[in-house]
Amino acid sequence: MSAPPRVLTVAGSDSGGGAGIQADLKTMLALGVHGMSVITAVTAQNSLGVQGAWELPVEAVRAQYRSVVDDIGVQAVKTGMLASAELVEAVAELISDTVAPAVVDPVGISKHGDSLLAASALDSVRTKLLPVATVATPNLDEVAQLTGVRVESEEQLRSAAAAVLAYGPKWVLIKGGHLSGDAVDLLTDGSEEHWLRAPRHDNRHTHGTGCTLASAIACGLAEGRSVPEAVAVAKEYVTGAIAAGFALGSGIGPVDHGWRFRAGT
């Protein structure tokens, strides 16, 4: 029996299980690929926020990555929380030496507003990590953090995309979920555009949305889909996960990564 496509997530651990490595691996399982992980940081985290975060040494991150890639191999890599400039630069170097598409989720701030990336690392994200990305998936807060461009309307998504593309990713998906109205995202490589729309669900339990979407895109790329097709399929999956998000603890609960199993599809 042949192995399923293999996807490697390079991200932080969320002890509450809603985002980070845990969300990535749940997404990969739900979408039928074999998920593997490189843990970059450990967080003490729950539905109320992040109570603490501890990054791993660069040598530990590099050893995890080489251990997986050199033996098992990967068809796609996804990055999340990288915490420091040293980790960002090490991971960018590792990705540049890997023949596989890379989905970069430039995680800067948690769902609860907690910082997950040192200010000193922003320039490394711009100059080292984004240039090796097949697809970069910033939300509007991350766009502002990286480029200074602030988006308040759908029409401004193009300006945001151009500002991120200037740093070198092949494609950028600007996530407009923080705008009012339908959840609209813009995927572009600077020449072609794909506008993705989905109804906005009245559900506050959306912890892990960005991690889940980026991981789902990586799954599609690992299966050999084109970037536009992988993003469209991922958008459909995460929309269902948001609709099924559930309360957990006394704060913001997670999206439901297993919603298709519960729906019987």
Image (cartoon, rainbow, N blue to C red):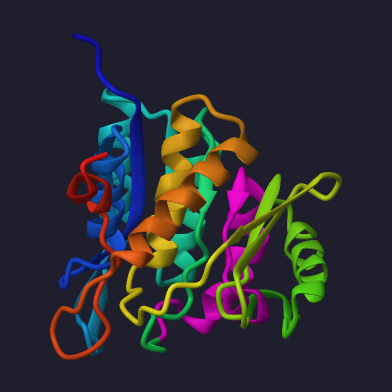
The relative height of residue 216 versus residue 127 in the rendered view (above or below) is above
Residue 219 in the image: x percent, y percent?
41, 38
In which image quadrant can residue 6 be found? top left
Is the magenta region chiefly helix, strand or loop? Answer: helix
Residue at 53%, 66% (x, y): give it: 199
Q: Along the line of sight, which residue is nearer the eye, 247 or 174?
A: 247
The relative height of residue 83 versus residue 104 in the rendered view (above or below) is below
40 displayed left or right of 127: left
* Residue 123 falls within the magenta-colored stretch: yes
Looking at the rendered image, the quarter that the C terminus falls into is top left
Q: Along the line of sight, which residue is nearer the eye, 158 or 167?
A: 158
Residue furthest to the right in view is 191
* Residue 194 falls within the magenta-colored stretch: no
Residue 186 in the image: x percent, y percent?
70, 59
138 displayed left or right of 234: right
Residue at 60%, 71% (x, y): give it: 182
Magenta-tinted stretch: 115-144
49 displayed left or right of 154: left
Residue at 18%, 50% (x, y): give it: 262
Looking at the rendered image, the quarter that the N terminus falls into is top left
Residue 8 showing in the rendered view: yes
Residue at 51%, 58% (x, y): give it: 89
